[in-house]
Amino acid sequence: MSNTASLRPRPVASEHTPLKARDVAFDWADTPLHWIPGDPDSTHTINVLHLLLPAGERWFVHVYKQVLPQIRDPRLREDVLGFIGQEAMHSQAHDDVLPHLKRLGLDPTPYTAQVDWLFEKLLGDRPPVVPPLPPGRARQWWLMERVAIIAAIEHYTAFLGDWVLNARALDARGADPTMLDLLRWHGAEEVEHRSVAFDLFLHVDGGYRRRVRTWATAFSALVFLWQRGVRFFMANDPTLPDGRASFREFARAGRQGVLPTAGAMARSVPQYLSRAYHPSRYGSTAQAAAYLAESPAATAAEARTEAAASPRTATPGTPATRPTGAA
């Protein structure tokens, strides 16, 4: 039908950019437990990212490696490979925060063990509940379900990335600069690659009913895991004798700009469920690129990459030496 065709998702061409992984490193030695000063509630609400993302983004990579052979579009394949590289780096960067939290007296292991089980077992390669289909069809059905779930999750990671790039209240409150750089480097890359997961879903399946169904799954799981994570952090924070998470504190932080507002998150729901939705219409690749050009961690990674790629200056008449570690 012509009206259906007019509603097909249309990307904004100018928002596409080649993707590359940036081998960032962060020094957590001076980052306090409450890195938003005087605000453990908001700190721990954002800290849940460190609990969810290492396992979640490893799972993204695992699923996408399985779907790579089904990609027929060369540019999309390059985008997916760039996405895989960035997500692997995100997982490692957030995983590196966890030992620091443990040194500060907050051991995240009991919660991360549950998250690992969710992604490795419940969302693993063997579907927990399958329709009466032959094994080959069941495996493909489950792969498409997981591709669609990732597209839905990426809608929210891009939402959070766009939010943190614009959350000037965090700077005004004196948030730890290293943690802010981690969050904004990651957020910028989420904005940079925000269309890849959805484009891949459209390429290999694209069914609207599957999009709605998996959105409901992803959204429910994120809300459930996030509130459990905040409750875990607040209850186990050694500096809080009676730490409790509350929606009142979440709403207060939203009004102050140190967390996203519930209203903004609610408005993101009809965006994704619109038949005309495409991620390129939300967020700014130019803004993401501008932050990545000034991020301390990203620029240091770029300098290391350039130094490793450049041969050392040779004495005239002698062959140039290779970089340390070169074959």
Image: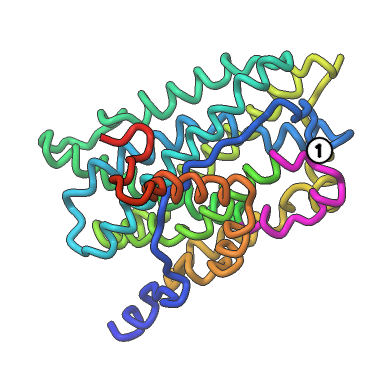
Left or right: residue 59 compared with residue 90: left
Residue drawn at (58%, 61%) of the image: 288
> How far across and down, in percent of the image, does residue 323 sit?
37, 39
Asked if residue 275 lies left or right of residue 321, the reply is: right
Between 92 and 146, the one lying in front of the other is 92
| Number of marks present in the image shown | 1
- Taking the spot 46% from the left edge, 30% from the top edge, the residue there is 55
Question: Considering depth in this image, is 255 or 285 the residue closer to the camera?
Answer: 285
Q: How far from the left and from the top, in percent, is residue 132?
A: 17, 35
Magenta-colored span: 162-178
Q: Which residue is mark 1?
A: 36
Out of 227 and 187, give the one closest to the viewer.
Answer: 187
Q: Residue sitting at 43 percent across and 43 percent down?
A: 87
Percent across and percent down for residue 83 are: 38, 51
Among the 4 quarters of the image, the one containing residue 253: top right
Q: Quadrant of the N terminus?
A: bottom left
Q: As rendered, which of 88 and 10 lies closer to the eye?
A: 88
Query: Which residue type carries mark 1?
Result: Ile
- Residue 135 higher or lower than 264, as above or below: above
Q: Looking at the image, what colour scheme do you see?
A: rainbow
Q: Position of residue 147 (x, y in %)?
A: 33, 47
Left or right of 197? Residue 113 is right
**Which residue occupies the extreme bottom position in the image?**
2
